[in-house]
Image (cartoon, rainbow, N blue to C red):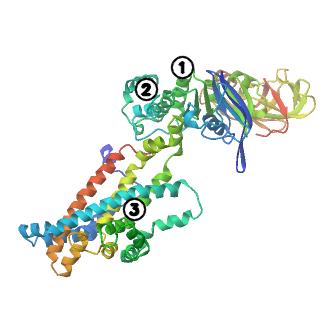
Amino acid sequence: MNSMLFSRQRTVLPGFKLTLGFTIFYLCLIVLIPLSAIFTKTSTLTWAQFHEVATSPVAMASYRLTFGASFGAALVNAVFGLIVAWVLVRYNFFGKRLLDALVDLPFALPTAVAGITLARLYAENGWIGHLLSRAGIKVANTQMGIFVALTFIGLPFIVRTIQPVLEDLDAEVEEAAASLGANRWQIFWRVIFPMLTPALLTGIAMAFARALGEYGSVIFIAGNIPLKTVITPVLIMGELDMFSYAKATALAVVLLVISFVLLLVINLLQWWSSRHHEHL
Amino acid sequence: MSVEVKNVTKKFSHFTALDNVSLKVESGELVALLGPSGSGKTTLLRIIAGLEFPDPGAQILYYGEDVTMIPASQRKAGFAFQHYALFRHMSVFENIAFGLRVRPRATRPPEAEIRARVDKLLKLIQLEPMAGRFPSQLSGGQRQRVALARALAVEPKVLLLDEPFGALDAKVRKELRRWLRQLHDEIHITTLFVTHDQEEALEVSDRVAILRAGRVEQIGTPEEIYDHPASPFVYDFLGNVNLFHGRALEGSVAIGATEFVVRNQKEATAPAVAFVRPHDIRVMRQANGSASLPAKVVRSNAAGPVANLDLVRQDSGEAFTVQLSKEEFQQLQPKPGEEVFVQLRNVRVFSDDYSI
């Protein structure tokens, strides 16, 4: 009798088996089957062919650019997204709602529209581009342009993951720190920031993942110069345009595996940093 | 040598939290701020800590030094919150060490001294084996002790506790408030603590200040305020009470057809309310010639250390309750519907405009 009670936890809502079954089925259908197709398609190549495609100088340059720019953009967003979230949560001012809604724009805007707009703005005769070119900075058709586009699309991920955590922070914890003699700087770095770290890491992971797969907003501003401003997704599209599907999937596999490992690392980091964050 | 607040008023947009409050806590004293919710007790404590600022005209003095405009971080007041407000990403040890670690380099003690001081505090709160644990791994009572140690680590001039035992269950509460009293007897730090629990205030503190609607209603030792309440509010707040409507006479009160001696003097013939504690009522089978009222038993409950009796007056129908010892209850064996006589002791009379 007792063992029955412990082995099967009865809850108010039934349907564990049903929902788990559905979850697995759905994940297979939507995620696993398409992904495994990439691997099967790639396996039509011999190891030598795969090696050649995956490690060609053009491909290697594109990996460096894609991962570097994505990570850089995520880090920049981590800093400025945190500030934006801070301002939106901590202060009340005229137009706050509008600013809050503005943050979601990169989510909602079709990426191609964002790409064309950014390309126009940063072109040498564009609003921002001509100011920058006077200072000798070129954005359009450079790696800088890719970085700008990836920063643009990544911002909401950071802001929206930090915002709720910041809102839930207990004001008493800050007051306790103040009454113990901590100044504002110490309160932020020693008390608030550590409590935000898990959310910040989640935000970075999401912005980073989003940037890795970004295509639409980058192609217009990047100029797509081989070895210089070609990101891996563009390279994949190029192979697809030439109907070399196996080569395209080979590149995709590399992108996929590296992304997966990096995201796993970030998730572990996030788990580690939040291990004591049970709600008190 | 004391902590003193003078003429503190605090208005929030539509609400006066504190109305010209003045209070003095002597050095080494343990004072309770007691009052119902909304009486301003927490606001007063936060103003003393520097977490909130009073309206102009007020003065906060720590040992004669005016700290009214000094922010919390420079006041050296230890503050403990009802929900502990521990740093959940730091171990118990680091929580306690925090106040020492954030000091400017010039006044920060060396690492070895920080360790020694934290170890000493861990011993004081009897949590030495828990130094490496995180707050989420502690019970509520343990968390509050860590919060106290954290506040004590900076050697504060005054210790301020905001409903320190409010979030704990009844048994832990009692243990912890005894422990707090012992701790205070050991270290003699000037302490103010906020509570809405009159039992806690009366048991722990040297003096109790009773707040009501932003004003100090009465301040005195627990005995003083319990035995000589200055107002019906204080009387009511400190324990259960029965009301008997009647007329005040010279030194006595007429309730129904009977006169009872009164402990506080009142001018004659005003309509008045007599206040009597449930344990100050004696129940008898027969009227024995001394002043008594006829009443009828409604309900009796003998579970617990004392027996409770619900009665109604035969003449006016007013309901009241009586506390009897177990022996008295055994002797009397009251059954619902039976008629008895009650004698009132320690009667206090207040004018008829107070309602509970």
Chain identity of mark 2:
B
Task: Calculate the distance from the C-alpha at mark 3 to the C-alpha at mark 2.
Answer: 42 Å
Residue B335 in view here: no
Residue B25 screen position, x and y as percent: 67, 25
Residue B127 screen position, x and y as percent: 42, 27
> Same chain for the residues at labels 3 and 1, yes or no?
no
Q: Which image quadrant: the N terminus of chain A?
A: top left
Chain identity of mark 1:
B
Depth order, front residue of B242/B210: B210
The label number, if any, that marks residue B295 in the structure image: none
> Same chain for the residues at labels 1 and 2, yes or no?
yes
Which amino acid, by three-letter code, is at mark 1? Ile
Q: Is residue A91 above or below residue B355?
A: below
Residue B318 screen position, x and y as percent: 79, 38
The residue beneath circle 3 is A157
Could you say which quadrant of the image residue B271 lies in? top right
Category of crowding for the residue at label 3, using alpha-carbon neighbours closer than 10 angstroms: few (below 14), some (14–19), many (at least 20): many
**Among numbered discs 1 and 2, the one appearing first in the sequence:** 2
Report the mark closest to the observer, 1 or 2: 2
Task: Calculate the distance from the C-alpha at mark 1 to the C-alpha at mark 2.
Answer: 21 Å
| Residue at (35% x, 59% y) in the render | A74
**Helix or strand or loop: what does disc 2 sit on?**
loop
